[in-house]
Amino acid sequence: MQRVWIFFAQASLTTIKISGLAILLGLCLGFIAALSSLSRLTVVRWPARAYVSVFRGTPALIQLFLLYFGGLQLGLEMSPIQAGIIGLGINIGAYMTESIRGAIIAVDKGQTEAGRCLGLSRAQTMARVILPQAARLMVRPLGVNSVALIKGSAIVSTISVTELTYTAHRFISSTYKPFEMFILAAIFYLIIITLFMRLVQWIDTRVALKE
């Protein structure tokens, strides 16, 4: 059983790696799409809204298959881990877009007017006035999105990424103990998510202290 724990510990590192990089990609896409969706320019606003609608309205598993298997058909070769990171990142980015957009909209409109009265441009007002205030409102929703991604990262096992769920399936075939293997995977997921939520709470506290 000790040997099994070692393999699960290694698989948990893969889960953390994929989830962490996907969260970073999702944050980048989310900020870009959120700001674009608030643009006055239709040519900028509508692609962002289309991105959110498509990737929130279709299953993440189908998106992953289209990226990995469909990409191979189109000549776009990538490793399962690369496909997993990109697929999860693009998917969670659509959800993060709405969290970020909602936080920005929640900031009092008077703040925008105050920034403009001080002679700041629209971009400067957003960067120096709105986003610092919206940051406090973003932390928890983005944390919830990230936890959902960590739990949803199990779908990358379908393209043979050796993460926690894939490792559980692999040992079930050799030990014939599905209950024990899935419980073990659940324990590692719980540890990862608990530690991540502690990190989110710490960030939330730090941001609150700066206000």
Image (cartoon, grey):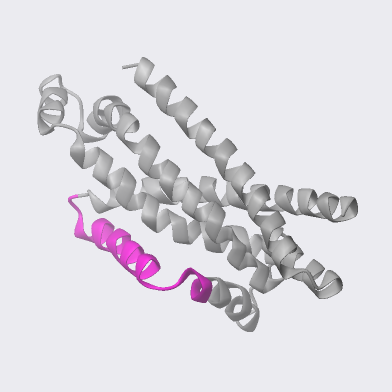
Task: Say above or below: 135 vs 97.
Answer: above
Position of the N terminus, as image quadrant, is: bottom right
Decide if residue 33 is in sight here.
no
**Image position, residue 137 (x, y; %):** 30, 34
Q: Residue at x 15, y 30 (%)?
A: 112
Decide if residue 78 is in sight here.
yes
**Image position, residue 176 (x, y; %):** 81, 73
Task: Say above or below: 102 vs 110.
Answer: below
Position of the C terminus, as image quadrant, is: top left
Q: Residue at x 49, y 48 (%)?
A: 147
**Image position, residue 75 (x, y; %):** 65, 78
In this image, 29 relative to 18: left or right?
A: left
Q: Nearer the viewer, residue 65 or 75?
A: 65
Task: Based on the picture, tell me whether residue 110 belongs to the magenta stretch.
Answer: no
Q: Nearer the viewer, residue 100 or 152?
A: 152
Task: Based on the picture, tell me whether residue 47 belongs to the magenta stretch.
Answer: yes
Q: Residue at x 35, y 64 (%)?
A: 51
Task: Say above or below: 140 vs 92.
Answer: above
Which image quadrant for residue 59?
A: bottom left
Q: Nearer the viewer, residue 200 or 130?
A: 200
Q: Which residues are magenta?
A: 40-63
**Image position, residue 178 (x, y; %):** 73, 69
